């Protein structure tokens, strides 16, 4: 059971927009700690996609965006492409656990 | 270009020990906080441990506290994870990752990540 809750899977057709939610609590996202997002392609290491709730590292397309509200964060992907098929993880800090925590991951399928 | 290269994984019996290494290049290692994150086969990501740069402190997940020790040799640009009393549930790919700041902080993210090294705990 992950501290941050993500839907196990989402899907969309090429060109469409999808969102992935990350629900936390008052000891992590709701306490004001930032949410970060990672993309993990099949067989590869995770790659940072969004940091500090809504910032993209250099090289990440602007099709990817992040937001945060209350105890939740969201990742939006517009103009879906087949190469976006991957697992996506959110991450934050939890004050009760005194450490970084991850969501359980969401598998994105591009139909 | 920042590069992280893990090594030291393998098969170990329950109760055994193993030391992982992560060779870093392309950035000023001694002033960077570093972390270990693991991923059990077919499962999600789990933060394991972090260590601050510039002789700062170390931090551990409850699941490994007292059994694992994170350390660094700044003269060799290398991060370590010494693992003792290994259990079947420690079986995972272990990734090392760079934190954004010198001192480990609550807002930290991980970027970049190494390619990982597989640890299998089995008799």
Image (cartoon, rainbow, N blue to C red):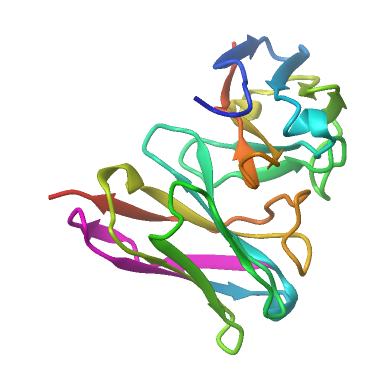
Does the segment drawn in magenta span residue B7? yes
Question: Where residue B104 sits in the image (x, y, percent)?
Answer: 72, 61
* Residue shown at 70% from the left, 14% from the top: A14
* Residue shown at 63% from the left, 65% from the top: B34
* Residue shown at 49% from the left, 48% from the top: B62
Q: Nearer the viewer, residue B71 or A60?
A: B71
Residue B65, compared with residue A2, is above or below; it is: below
Q: Which range of residues does the magenta coloring cover?
A: B1-22
Residue A47, compared with residue A77, is above or below; it is: below
Quadrant for the C terminus of chain A in the image: top right
Question: Where residue A65 sits in the image (x, y, percent)?
Answer: 84, 29
- State which quadrant residue A82 falls in: top right
Outermost left residue: B123
- State which quadrant residue A85 falls in: top right
Question: Where residue B17 sits in the image (x, y, percent)?
Answer: 27, 65
Question: Where residue A12 sits in the image (x, y, percent)?
Answer: 67, 10
**Taking B11 as reference, is A65 left or right?**
right
Q: Nearer the viewer, residue A56 or A101?
A: A101
Judge whether residue B115 can be spotted in this image: no
Q: Nearer the viewer, residue A43 or B21?
A: B21
Q: How many marks?
A: 0
Judge whether residue B107 can be spotted in this image: yes
Residue B31, compared with residue A13, is above or below; it is: below
**Taking A84 as reference, is B105 left or right?**
right
Does the segment drawn in magenta span residue B6? yes
């Amino acid at each position: 059971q992950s501290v941050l809750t993500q839907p196990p899977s989402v899907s969309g057709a090429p060109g469409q927009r999808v969102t992935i939610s990350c629900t936390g609590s008052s000891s992590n996202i709701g306490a004001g700690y930032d949410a970060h997002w990672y993309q993990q392609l099949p067989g590869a290491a995770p790659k940072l996609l969004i940091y500090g709730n809504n910032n993209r590292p250099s090289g990440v397309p602007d099709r990817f965006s992040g937001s945060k509200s209350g105890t939740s964060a969201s990742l939006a992907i517009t103009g879906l492409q087949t190469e976006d098929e991957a697992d996506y993880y959110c991450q934050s800090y939890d004050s009760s656990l005194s450490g970084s925590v991850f969501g359980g991951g969401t598998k994105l399928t591009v139909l | 270009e920042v590069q992280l290269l893990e090594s030291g994984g393998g098969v170990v019996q329950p109760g055994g020990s193993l030391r992982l290494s992560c060779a870093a290049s392309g950035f000023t290692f001694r002033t960077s906080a570093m972390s270990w994150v693991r991923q059990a086969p077919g499962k999600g990501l789990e933060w394991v441990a972090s260590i601050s740069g510039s002789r700062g402190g170390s931090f551990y997940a409850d699941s490994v506290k007292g059994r694992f020790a994170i350390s660094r040799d700044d003269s060799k640009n290398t991060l370590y994870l010494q693992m003792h009393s290994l259990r079947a549930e420690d079986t995972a790919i272990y990734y090392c990752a760079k934190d954004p700041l010198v001192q480990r902080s609550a807002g930290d993210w991980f970027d970049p990540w190494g390619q990982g090294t597989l640890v299998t705990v089995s008799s």
